[in-house]
Amino acid sequence: MDKITRRDFLSSTACGATAAMLSVAGCDSGLVGRGLMKRPNIIFIMADDMGYGDLGCYGQEHIQTPNIDKLAEEGMRFTDCYAGSTVCAPSRSVLMTGQHTGHTRVRNNMGKVGGTVVTDNGSPQRRVPLEDEDVTVAEVLKQAGYATGMTGKWGLGEPGNTGMPNRQGFDEWFGYLNQRRAHTYYPPYLWRNEEKLMLEGNADGGRRQYSHDMFTDFALDFLRRHKSEPFFLYLPFTVPHGRYEIPSTEPYTDKPWSDDAKVHAAMITRLDGDVGRIIALLKQLGLDEKTLVFFCSDNGAARRWEGVFDSSGPLRGHKGDLYEGGLRTPMIVRWPGKVPAGKTSDAPWYFADVLPTLAEVAGATTPANIDGISILPTLLGKKQRTDDRYLYWEFPAGKFQQAVRRRNLKAVRTAPGKPLELYDLAEDIGEKRDIAAGNPEIVAQIEQYLRTARTESANWPV
């Protein structure tokens, strides 16, 4: 894929055509450009704080997820896919920009320096927005002629600043701007484009408008309105993130669990039902075989729920950690007739790969300075070497942490100056046995990589 600067990118369109005149057959870009496939519609569904083990197709025994399990039966299930970060905002920044957390704009939920000061629950916090020079996947697809929509939780901009979704490539959006305000499912207002939409049913403490259901309604309406043109629909839902609120805990009301556990399970099953509604509507509209669908989580489980759901599965840690339990996400990709059905893949990839992959799918030009690669051949069941590169994460909360995966080896540094820990994920998925002492050459290679893996951030100085 050609790489260009943001200025060139925003002033041009793929193959030099206007978006309205874009012809896939005439656009020399990857498999689409070579006429091997027509560009599909794209839906990217993302749960919030759902663990690696929270779905039936990933080993869950107590939470019912028949529609997502069927998604896996009809598509490809990935065992070694990773989120962009171990918490909300930076993971979404990686997803949107194709840059890992050593390069992307937003590297933690709250900035240390600069940003927009927002007061949540009496505590002022710095929220770092995406800037004009940041190129998002929505901008890439919009430039290629896609209608772009989003509903759910954004987390990359505040009212009136450069990070607003409509200023980062989305034609329309509906949801929460600020991730802290997304903690309630009965908010007094949501954002519709750049205007507040007051929710009368939730006024004065009312609980009559459940935000997750409103997001699903928006998504279904978007599909109906854009059925005759290529579209990109980004669905960063907020369930099962706490606070634990839901209209009904069915079908788990009588289970011998805590109230929070019942809501956690009911949230996931409610999301599962909505995934089923989305797929059913695609079929009804004749879009099923024309639509590429992704399903994943934004980071690891917020709570491991050990002995109840075992939400992290066999993985070490949870949200906030750079061990596998904080980073590895369930990932299912479905595209009837293109993505092989019923296949499981252990190809390692992460959120930084989404932008270049969707750019190739759409026949669009990839912006410069991204860290990801297109994994479209992997999605189509073709041979592709994805494990001979470094996947990188950093997390500047508290002590600066770093993690690297290359092939089956994973290195973790829990604080500056501490020695690297090293794990062989093929033999030790739970990261229980540190093998760094016995592999000094490998550790030295990773240390060499880390010297050039990142750039300094003005908002998160190390």
Image (tube, rainbow, N blue to C red):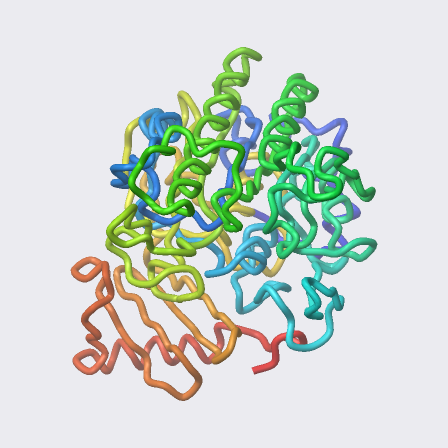
Is residue 245 visible in the rendered image? The answer is yes
Q: Residue at x 46, y 80 (%)?
A: 451
Nearest the eye: 99 or 245: 245
Q: Residue at x 61, y 47 (%)?
A: 184
Along the horizontal axis of the image, is 47 left or right of 174?
left
Splitting the image into 4 quarters, where does residue 231 fall? Answer: top right
Is residue 27 visible in the rendered image? The answer is no
> x, y (%) of residue 71?
38, 28
Vertical placement of residue 376 versus 392, above or below: above
Splitting the image into 4 quarters, where does residue 379 fall? Answer: top left
> x, y (%) of residue 190?
73, 42
Splitting the image into 4 quarters, where does residue 214 fall? Answer: top right
Which corner quadrant holds the C terminus? bottom right
Along the horizontal axis of the image, is 2 left or right of 51?
right
Nearest the eye: 221 or 119: 119
> x, y (%) of residue 180?
63, 57
Q: Residue at x 54, y 17 (%)?
A: 281
> x, y (%) of residue 20?
76, 28
Along the horizontal axis of the image, is 22 left or right of 385?
right
Q: Residue at x 49, y 17 (%)?
A: 280
Count of labels shown? 0
Vertical placement of residue 344 versus 88, above or below: above
